[in-house]
Image (cartoon, rainbow, N blue to C red):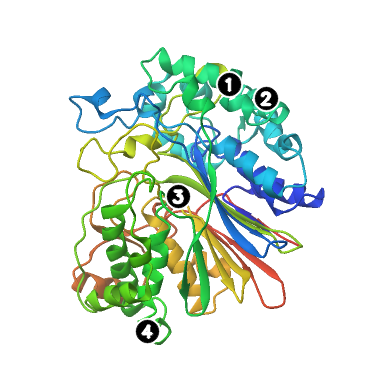
């Protein structure tokens, strides 16, 4: 079973499985295809996080494929600024981790070569693919941002206009860069001509990344963080990912009888939203690169602390928690093969089209993830050289009796732990299949898509009675569309006790579940 936010990426994963590849080979193929066919959400110039379950090892491992800031990235370089620019060359201050992640996953678990798994992505880049509605709409909404960067505009605004839905979208320069990686491995990106071209282009614009920053880059395999929810073992990537918020909220919700409350009621939505707010409070207090500051996970993930959070929730009134706006353009996907290997992964450029900077003739759009660093010297996530920033990316997996049961995740910045919590409660507490769980009405509270807000954005399919009750409790409810992209693009795979796989992809995107 393969799920992803674009049907061509899902199909590519299926092709690799049919070719004899395993879940890890297929996952890298999906990742690479998303970097081509969903370029507004993710790309070779971005980061990724991976959760991998190996049937042979009967264990889950996590790979942190996020990049560190360059050695020149100091707060002094932004003297006089209140924050790091969100677009342009000065927003590109972390090394992209994507290619390193592909290499690590294939070397640890893959059967096929890098050239074999990148073949579908290279084909879509060189020969083109039908432009999706999501890419068309996002391009139109960010027309001005793209227009400011001539190299980027030439690719994404051909002839100075937004490409039509279904038109053939070709990225030959990106295809050539992927071919270099297919032939030479990750060194083509970090130590070869691609690295030199990226750094040269940035340096001509007073950029902060050096050739040594690229050459020194390395992601790492790390132990996942864990918790439980109603007998299910929860797995997330540790900090600098915000994954621990997804565990914290669910463990607090064990103290609420959601099934008795009924799905879609006030007593379903309200405690979930409040548990997540409390998790966000602690996340914003502690989350950064753990090499630079302690993140007290033992306390935050303990059952005693979950009970404290549950006890702090007013069952009839909304609380107020302040948060800082983040970008939310991301792509989540998952793969399970016939042997039971499972991969849950997520990748991003941070904002839509990232920094909007395409590095010369490489076709590589660079992320602006480092713009989330703080310039406040007292802030836990303050900018320092060689540091990973606070990351919203959080692929998830739940095991039952030691075997993968649920792979789940979503695009959407602040919405990621919120939608993950909805998916888990709908599947575990209400027995929904994964397609129903992701299709049911959703919400997103607080900051997302760069907005500073305390609004509770609720899809209009939520019942009027529930919406009224949320308003009376003090939630700043704002209704959005029936299937609104603001709540993210979620996907999930369930493996039942008979070994059957069922998948769900979000009707709010261009995805597909492919299984047999």
- Residue indicated by mark 1: 194
Q: Label 3: how many residues lie within 10 Å, few (<14), some (14-19) or many (20+)?
A: many
Screen quadrant of the C terminus: bottom right
* Crowding near the residue tagged with mark 4, few <14, some 14–19, many ≥20 C-alpha atoms within 10 Å: few
Q: Nearer the viewer, residue 75 or 398?
A: 75
Number of the label disc, if any, that sits on residue 261: 4
Spatial CA distance of label 2 from label 1 is: 8 Å
Q: Relative to residue 220, is residue 127 drawn left or right?
A: right
Choose mark 3 or mark 4, whichever is in front.
3
Say which label, 2 or 1, has the lower sequence index: 2
Residue located beneath label 3 in the image: 393
Residue sitting at x 19%, y 42%: 378
Location of the N terminus by quadrant is: bottom right
Q: Give residue 180's mark.
A: 2
Dot 4: element: helix
**Mark positioned earlier in the residue sequence (2 or 3):** 2
In the image, 49: left or right of 343?
A: left
Q: Toward which corner of the image does residue 382 lie, by quadrant? A: top left
Q: Is residue 295 above or below residue 117?
A: below
Q: Secondary structure at mark 3?
A: loop
Q: Position of residue 160 (x, y in %)?
A: 46, 20
- How far across and down, in percent of the image, does residue 320 sit? 19, 63
User: Label 1: how many residues lie within 10 Å, few (<14), some (14-19) or many (20+)?
Assistant: many
């Amino acid at each position: 079973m393969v799920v992803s936010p674009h049907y061509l990426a899902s199909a590519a994963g299926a092709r690799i499985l049919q070719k004899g590849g395993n879940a890890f080979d297929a996952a890298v193929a999906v990742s690479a295809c998303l970097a081509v066919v969903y370029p507004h959400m993710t790309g070779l110039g971005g980061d990724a996080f991976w959760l991998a379950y190996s049937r042979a090892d009967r264990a889950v491992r996590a790979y942190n494929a996020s990049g560190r800031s360059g050695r020149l990235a100091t707060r002094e370089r932004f003297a006089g600024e209140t924050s790091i620019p969100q677009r342009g060359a000065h927003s590109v201050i972390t090394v992209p981790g994507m290619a390193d992640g592909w290499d690590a996953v294939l070397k640890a678990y893959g059967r096929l070569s890098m050239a074999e798994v990148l073949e579908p992505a290279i084909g879509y880049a060189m020969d083109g693919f039908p432009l999706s509605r999501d890419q068309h709409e996002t391009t139109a909404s960010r027309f001005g941002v793209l227009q400011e960067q001539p190299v980027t505009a030439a690719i994404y605004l051909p002839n100075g206009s937004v490409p039509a839905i279904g038109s053939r979208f070709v990225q030959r320069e990106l295809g050539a860069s992927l071919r270099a990686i297919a032939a030479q491995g990750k060194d083509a990106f970090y130590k070869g001509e691609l690295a030199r071209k990226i750094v040269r282009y940035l340096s001509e614009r007073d950029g902060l990344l050096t050739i040594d920053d690229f050459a020194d880059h390395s992601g790492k395999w790390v132990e996942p963080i864990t918790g439980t929810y109603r007998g299910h073992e929860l797995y997330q990537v540790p900090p600098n990912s915000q994954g621990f918020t997804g565990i914290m909220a669910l463990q607090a919700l064990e103290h609420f009888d959601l099934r008795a409350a009924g799905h879609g009621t006030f007593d379903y939505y309200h405690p979930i939203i409040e548990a997540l707010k409390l998790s966000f409070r602690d996340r914003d207090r502690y989350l950064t690169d753990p090499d630079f500051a302690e993140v007290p996970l033992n306390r935050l993930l303990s059952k005693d602390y979950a009970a404290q959070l549950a006890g702090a929730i007013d069952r009839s009134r909304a609380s107020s928690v302040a948060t800082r706006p983040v970008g939310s353009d991301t792509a989540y996907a998952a793969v399970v093969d016939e042997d039971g290997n499972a991969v849950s992964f997520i990748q991003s450029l941070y904002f839509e089209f990232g920094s909007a900077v395409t590095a010369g003739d490489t076709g590589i759009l660079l992320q602006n993830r480092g713009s989330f660093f703080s310039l406040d010297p007292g802030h836990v996530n303050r900018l320092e050289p060689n540091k990973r920033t606070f990351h919203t990316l959080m692929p998830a997996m739940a095991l039952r009796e030691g075997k993968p049961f649920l792979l789940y995740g979503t695009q959407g910045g602040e919405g990621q732990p919120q939608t993950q919590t909805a998916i888990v409660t709908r599947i575990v507490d209400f027995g929904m299949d994964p397609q129903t769980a992701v299709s049911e009405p959703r919400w997103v509270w607080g900051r997302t898509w760069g907005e500073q807000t305390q609004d509770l954005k609720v899809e209009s399919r939520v019942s009027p009675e529930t919406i009224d009750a949320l308003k009376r409790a003090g939630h700043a409810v704002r209704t959005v569309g029936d299937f609104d992209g603001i709540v993210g693009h979620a996907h999930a795979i369930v493996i039942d006790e008979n070994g059957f796989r069922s998948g769900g992809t979000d009707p709010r995107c261009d995805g597909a579940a492919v299984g047999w």
